Image (spheres, rainbow, N blue to C red):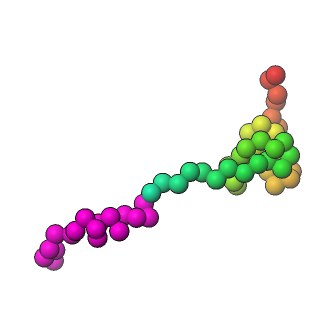
């Protein structure tokens, strides 16, 4: 099994890890109630997804 002949420099190591940073989630708005919602997920406040109601949500207000 091969072994590295030289130590990997900090520059090379950091360049390899340049794409590993976490990004913030991209929030969008619900088309029915305009609440913030993650993409490709049902709206938790109204139960709509892509313009149609998917689940029944009871309002406890």
- The image shows residue 48 at horizontal and vertical percentages of 82, 46
The answer to which image quadrant residue 6 occupies is: bottom left
Quadrant in which the N terminus appears: bottom left
Q: Is residue 15 magenta?
A: yes
- From which residue to which does the magenta span run? 1-20
Q: Is residue 4 magenta?
A: yes
**Residue at x-position 86% and y-position 53%:** 51
**Residue at x-position 77% and y-position 41%:** 35
Quadrant in which the C terminus appears: top right
- The image shows residue 56 at horizontal and vertical percentages of 82, 38
Say if 44 sits above or below 31 in the image. above
**Residue at x-position 64% and y-position 53%:** 26
Decide which of 32, 1 is in the foreground and name it: 32
Q: Residue furthest front?
A: 11
- The image shows residue 36 at horizontal and vertical percentages of 73, 44
Left/right of residue 15 with respect to residue 22 in the rendered view: left
Q: Residue furthest top?
A: 61
Left/right of residue 60 with respect to residue 20 in the rendered view: right
Decide which of 51, 19 is in the foreground and name it: 19
Decide which of 60, 9 is in the foreground and name it: 9
Q: Is residue 11 visible?
A: yes
Decide which of 3, 19 is in the foreground and name it: 19
């Amino acid at each position: 099994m091969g072994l590295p002949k030289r130590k990997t420099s900090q520059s090379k190591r950091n360049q390899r890890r340049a794409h590993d940073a976490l990004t913030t989630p991209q929030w969008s708005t619900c088309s029915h109630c305009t609440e913030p919602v993650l993409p490709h997920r049902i709206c938790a406040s109204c139960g709509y997804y892509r313009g149609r109601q998917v689940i029944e949500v009871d309002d406890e207000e």
